Amino acid sequence: MTDRSAAETTGPDQFIGATPDNALRNAERADAGPVLAADGTPLKKSLNRALRLSKLRALMLIAPLLIFVVVTFIAPIADMLFRSVENNIVADTLPRTIAALDDWDETTGNPPDNATFEALYKDMYRAVEAKAHTRLGSRLNYELTGMSSLFRKSGRKVEDMGEVFQDQFEDLDGFWKDGENWNALMGTDSWLAAMEGWDTSDKKGQPPFEMRDGLAAMLPQTATAFQDYAQFIQRVDEKNLARQDPWALVYSALYNDLTSGADVSGYTGPAVAELQAAAAAVDGFETVDYRAAFVDIDEDWADPEVWKTVRLYGPNLTNGYFLNAVDMQKTPQGVEMRPENQQIYITLFWRTLVMSLAITGMCILLGYPVAWLLANLPARSANLLMILVLLPFWTSLLVRTSAWKVMLQQQGVVNDTLVWYHSTAVGKILDPVVTLLMNVVIGALNAVVWIWNLLSGIWGAVDVELFTYAALGFERLALINNVTGTIIAMTHILLPFMILPLYSVMATIPPVYLRAAKSMGATNWTAFWRVYFPQSVPGIGAGSILVFILAIGYYITPEIVGGTKGVFISNRIAYHISSSLNWGLAAALGSILLAAVLLLYWAYDRIVGIDNVKLGG
Amino acid sequence: MLDNQPNDGFVVFDRVQKSYDGETLVVKDLNLSIGKGEFLTMLGPSGSGKTTCLMMLAGFETATHGDILLDGNPINNISPHKRGIGMVFQNYALFPHMTIAENLSFPLEVRNMGKAEREEKVKRALDMVQMGEFGGRRPAQLSGGQQQRVALSRALVFEPDLVLMDEPLGALDKQLREHMQFEIKAIADNLGITVVYVTHDQTEALTMSDRVAVFEDGRIQQLAPPDQLYEEPQNSFVAQFIGENNTLEGTIQEIKDGIALVKLDDGSLIDAKPINVDKAGDRTQISIRPERVEINPDLGASAHTLKAEVLEFIYMGDVFRTRLRVAGNDNFIVKTRNRADQQRLEPGTQVDIGWLPQDCRALDA
Ligand SMILES: Nc1ncnc2c1ncn2[C@@H]1O[C@H](COP(=O)(O)OP(=O)(O)OP(=O)(O)O)[C@@H](O)[C@H]1O
Ligand SMILES: [Mg+2]
C-alpha cells in the first residue's frame, strides 16, 4: 500500500496541468484575489467579454422563437391579469356622473341631487348615441342584478328627456331647427368654407369640425356638447354634419348656458339676433326635473343602492372581480362574504385542488408500475406496451371521455358486469364480506375527509361520494356525473403524462444498481426502496407537476362526466368566457388559479427541489 | 465433484453450463476450484463468458446445468444476504443519490448494524483506500479513480470472504490502472480475502493473480499461475493470447527423445517440444517467444536453423525489435536486449535463426 504522499502525487485527483478539474480549482482559488489575464485585465472581466459575444449570438438565434413565445404566451397572460382588475367602462361611460357623485352623502339614504341626475342625463345621452349603455348595464349587472334592464330601459327614453328644450327653442325661432344654422353659429369660417368645397362622395374626407373662437368662453356647455355631437357624427357615424340636426343634448346645454347668465350682449358673430332673442326668452322656458324624469322611467333610480353601486365601481381599477372570485363582495360598508347561497367559487377552488391532487396520486400509483415495466421489459414487449400507453393520444379526447360515459353510466358496462357478478354464486357469498370491508373503508375515509374539512374550517357533512353498496350491494353504483366519474376519467386521460416522464427517468437507471444493492445483502424490497426508488423520484416529481398542472386547468372531461358535483373551477371560467361574458371575473378566477399553481410550484421547489425534476436523461 | 482439487475448494464450479437463449451455450462445461485466500483471474477475449461466470457466482444468473458451490454449499441454497460476496462492478455502481459514506454504510445498514459500529467501519474502510476525507461527497463529485477506490472499499466494508471484481479498472487510464492494480493486490493480500477478478488485459492478469483462468468461447483453455501460463502455454490459443508470440505452421516429422522435428510448410526443418501433438503426420503450430529466438545461433551441429530475411528494425530503448520473414511468415519478431555489442540488423540482411528445442512448443494447429 502506498503512503499518503505517494497518493498525493499519483492520485487520481492530482494531475498537474490544464485539466478541467484544475481549472475549477484555479477558479476557486480566484476568490482569494483576482486572477489576471495575459493583458492585465481581471480574468473574470475578460471572460465575461468573451462570453458576451457568444451570448448575443445565441440570443439572435432564438430571437424569433422568443418573440413568438412573448406574443402568444406572455402577452395573453398579461392581458388576462390586466382584465381581472380593469374597470374603465364605468368611468369612461359616466364620467360626469361619477364626478358629481363625489358630493353625495350616501348615508342619508336619499338618492343624489338633481345635478347628479343632470350629469347622468348628459352621460347617458352620449352613451346611447354610442350604444355603450347596454355594455355598461351588463357590467354593473354582475354587481347588482337589475342594472342591465335599468340601463336598457333608460337608454330608450333618455333621448326624449331633453326634447322639452329643443321644442321650446324651435318654437321660439325656426332658426334653431336647422343643423345648417347651428353649424354656421358654432363653426369657424374656414371650416364652413372647407365644408362647402368638400366632395361628399369622398366619405373619409369630411373636414373635421372647428369651433369658433370665443364661443367656448361664452357658451361653455353648449360648446362642449356641440363639439361632442360634431365629433360623433363625423368620426363614429361618418355622416355629413351639414345634413344632421343637433342632439337634444345641445339644446339643453344652450338652455343651461343662457340661464346661468351667459353674456351674449357683446357677441357680434353670426346669428346675433337669434341668440340674443333666445337669451331674453329662456327665463320663461319650461324646465326639466331630471331626477323626476329618471325616476319616472324606472323607480330604481331613486334607490340609493343603485347609486352606491355606480359609485363603487367608478374607479378605473377594481378588486371587485377578485373579491367575487373568492365569494366576497364589495359593499358600501366594506368587503364582506357573500350570502351563503351565493358562495360557489371557494368550494370549487378547493374541490379542484383536492381532486387534482387525488388524480395526481392515482396517476402515480397506476403509472409507477407501468413505467417500471416499460423500463425493464425486453425491448419487444416494452415497445408493445409503449404503444398501448400512447394509444390514447391517437384517439380524440372527446371519444375517450365519452367512452367512459358508456362504461360507467347506470346501465353501463361496469354496472352491468357488477349486477351479473352479484347474481353469481361467488358474488352471493362474497358480497356481505365486501360490503362490510367497504363500509369500514368508507367510514375511515369519511372520517379523514371530515377531519380535513374541520381543520380547514368547514363544519358539517362530508361531500365525498364513495362506493356505496345498498344493503347487500345489488344497487348500481353511481360512477358518473359525480366526483368518482371525474377522477376515473381524468386519471385515465392524464396517465400517459405520468408514465412518460417516469419512464424516461427509469430508463436511465442502470439495473446494475439493484444488483449492487443485492450483492451487498439487501433484500429485493430494500434494494428497491433504498436504491431504485430514490433515483426515480425526479420522474415522479416531473410527472406529478405535469399531471397536476394539467388537471387543475382541465375542463372538457369534468364537463362531460363530472355532473354538478364533479366540475372544476375551469368549467366556471369557461362559462364566464363563453356564456355570461363576464371576462373580468373569468380573468380573476384564472389569475387565482395561476397564482395557486405558482405557489404550489414554489412550495414544491422548497420541499423537493426543482433540480430534482427530470423529464429524462 | 472434481477429482483432484489442488486446494480447499472454497468456490467450486462443477460442470457448469449456461445458455441465455436455449440455443447456444455461453459457458460450456466449466470446472474450476478456487482456494480460500486465492487471487484468481478470469482472462479472455470479449464475449468469452467471463461476466456470465461472475454473475452466476454472485447469484444474478442461474446456471443452466451443473453446480456452483460456495464453501461446500450449492449457491442457490444460500440466500443473497448470507452469501457474503462483495462485488465491484465495471462502472462502480456507486449509488448516485447517496454520499460516499452513505454508500459504504448501506451494506452495514441492511445487516442491521448499530450506528456507532457502522461509522467506525466506514471510516476504516475509507481510510484503507485513502479516501477518508471524501465521505461527505457524492459519487459524481469524484474522479474516476476515486470512485473506483470507493467501489472497492464498499465491496470490502462488510468483510466478505469472497470479492468479485468485473473489470474494475477498465475505465481508468494506464498509469492509474497500474497504480490501482498494485493497491488492490496489496489490500487483498492484507485482508486474506478470496478474489475472483475479471479482465481482458493480460498484463493485469499476470501481475496480480495467483492463478489465471484463460477463457475462450465458454471454456477454460488453461488454468495456471502467471509464469507457467507464459512459459508453458498448453495450446495455441493461450500461446497467442498471452504475451507476444511467433507462430509457424507445419507437420510433425518425428517425435524422438521428447523433441519433435517439425517440417514447416516451406520444407525447412526445426526442433520443438511436443505439447499437444502425439504422432508423426499431425498438423502443428509451433510457438516461440520473441526473446527466445537467437540470431545466427551457435547451437551445435545437430541443431536445425532457419533462413530469415530482416524486414524491419525497431529501436525501443531497452530492447531491439527485429521483424523478419521466416518460412513465409512476414511477422516473425525477434527481441534482443540492448547490449553494447549487440548488432543492429539492416533491412534486407539475410540471417540464420534458431532456438533451443525446449523453448519452442509444438501445439495444436
Ligand atoms: N443477458 C444476456 N442475454 C443473452 N445473451 C447474453 C446476455 N449476457 C451475455 N450474453 C452473451 O453471452 C456471451 C458471454 O457474455 P459475457 O458478458 O459473459 O462476456 P464477457 O466475457 O464478460 O465479455 P466482455 O469482456 O466483453 O465483458 C456473449 O456472447 C453475450 O452476447
Ligand atoms: Mg464482461
Image (cartoon, rainbow, N blue to C red):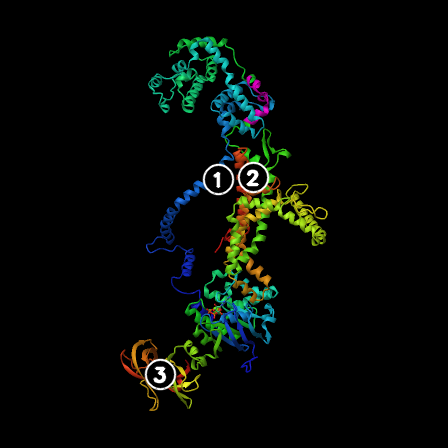
Secondary structure found at label 1:
helix
Which amino acid lies under the numbered mark 1 shown in the image of this protein?
Ile
Say whether residue A17 is visible: yes
Secondary structure found at label 3:
strand
Q: For disc 1, does the CB lie below 8 Å from ligand 1?
A: no
The stretch in magenta equals A293-310
Residue indicated by mark 1: A77
Query: Disc 1 vs disc 3: which is toward the camera?
Result: 3
What is the distance, in whole Å, between disc 2 and disc 3 at their CAs? Answer: 93 Å
Residue indicated by mark 2: A571
What is the distance, in whole Å, between disc 1 and disc 3 at their CAs? Answer: 89 Å
Secondary structure found at label 2:
helix
Which amino acid lies under the numbered mark 2 shown in the image of this protein?
Asn
Chain letter of the residue carrying label 3: B
What is the distance, in whole Å, between disc 2 and disc 1 at their CAs? Answer: 18 Å
Task: Identify the residue at horizontal 59%, vertical 34% (top origin).
Answer: A328
Counting from the top left corner in percent of width and height, residue A545 is at 53, 49
Q: Is residue A301 magenta?
A: yes
Specify the quadrant of the image occupied by residue B36: bottom right
Task: Identify the residue at horizontal 42%, vertical 59% (top origin).
Answer: A25
Chain letter of the residue carrying label 1: A
Which amino acid lies under the numbered mark 3 shown in the image of this protein?
Leu
* Screen quadrant of the N terminus of chain B: bottom right
Few, some or many C-alpha atoms within 10 Å of disc 2 (few <14, some 14-19, many ≥20)?
some
Few, some or many C-alpha atoms within 10 Å of disc 3 (few <14, some 14-19, many ≥20)?
many
Report the number of numbered marks. 3
Say whether residue B193 is visible: no
Q: Is residue A361 magenta?
A: no
Residue indicated by mark 3: B264
